[in-house]
């Protein structure tokens, strides 16, 4: 994931990656703390810190393997999803991510410790890509061949085996992704093509 390859990404994915790299680098340089970015409804409502509605998505924790893991998977599958399923419709893809953020913030009401939802958004994107490319074969570390539809579950199983604290966030992302997929792809098939989540751009 070098600069030249990032510059070739579709616009929304590219913007997300650059903002995330900027936020994480600024936190590493101690320009501000990650605590200034976390999602806290009390601070938003009582102290009008409205930036927290979005900034929590871009911070993946201390720079390390876990942060790289999430940023890598977001960049790879967001690029594929935006390039193919949302080709020439960047605003619709942005709308998808905004909806995803809304779903995740709703789920946070039931998972109090979830303060940075970037991992959840990553898993939502991976889940949607897997649903739209369910039969595509993926080669994991040149050892395991799986179908696209199995990718989110394999990654969640890896998080569980490695005892990562982000497992609940991963599950939140899968739930949000399934919610979007159901109402954008499944529900319209039984209701005359009506897509209740879509808007015209």
Image (tube, rainbow, N blue to C red):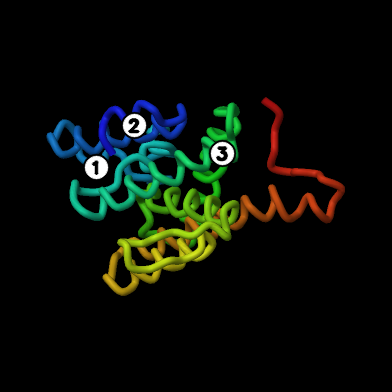
Q: Secondary structure at mark 3?
A: helix
Which mark, residue 34?
1
Nearer to us: label 1 or label 2: 2
Cα–Cα span, label 2 and label 3: 17 Å
Which of pointers 2 and 3 lies earlier in the amino acid sequence? Answer: 2
What residue is shown with label 2? 6
Q: Residue at x 30, y 42 (%)?
A: 59
Q: For the C terminus, which image quadrant?
A: top right
Where is residue 81? Give x, y as percent. Answer: 52, 42
Q: Secondary structure at mark 2?
A: helix
For the residue labelled by badge 1, is the local secondary structure a helix, a strand or a loop?
A: helix
Above or below residue 189? Residue 36 is above
Characterize the local packing of mark 2: few (<14), some (14-19) or many (20 or more) Cα atoms within 10 angstroms: some
How busy is the neighbourhood of tag 3: few (under 14 within 10 Å), some, or many (20 plus)?
A: few
* Rendered view: 26 above or below 170: above
Closest to the observer, 75 or 20: 75
Residue contact between numbered discs 2 and 3, judged by CB atoms under 8 Å: no
Gap in angstroms between the C-alphas marked 1 and 2: 24 Å
Can you identify the residue that label 3 sits on?
Answer: 84
Q: Residue 21 versus residue 43: which sits nearer the camera?
A: 21
The residue most toward the right is: 192
Picture coordinates of residue 85, whole percent (x, y): 59, 40
The N terminus: image quadrant: top left
Q: Does 100 sit left or right of 7 as displayed?
A: right
């Amino acid at each position: 994931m070098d600069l030249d390859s990032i510059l070739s990404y579709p616009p929304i994915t590219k913007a997300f990656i650059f903002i995330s790299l900027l936020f994480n680098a600024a936190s590493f340089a101690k320009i501000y703390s990650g605590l200034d970015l976390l999602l806290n409804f009390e601070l938003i409502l009582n102290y009008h810190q409205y930036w927290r509605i979005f900034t929590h998505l871009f911070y993946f924790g201390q720079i390390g393997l876990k942060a790289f893991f999430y940023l890598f998977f977001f960049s790879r599958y967001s690029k594929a999803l935006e390039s193919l399923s949302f080709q020439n419709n960047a605003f619709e893809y942005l709308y998808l991510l905004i909806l995803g953020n809304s779903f995740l913030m709703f789920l946070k009401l039931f998972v109090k410790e979830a303060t940075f939802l970037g991992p959840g958004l990553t898993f939502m994107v991976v889940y949607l890509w897997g649903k739209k490319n369910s039969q595509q074969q993926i080669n994991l570390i040149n050892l395991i061949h799986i179908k696209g539809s199995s990718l989110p579950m394999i990654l969640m199983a890896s998080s569980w085996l490695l005892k990562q604290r982000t497992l609940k966030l991963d599950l939140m992302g899968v739930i949000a992704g399934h919610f979007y997929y159901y109402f954008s792809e499944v529900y319209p098939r039984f209701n005359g093509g009506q897509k209740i989540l879509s808007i015209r751009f």
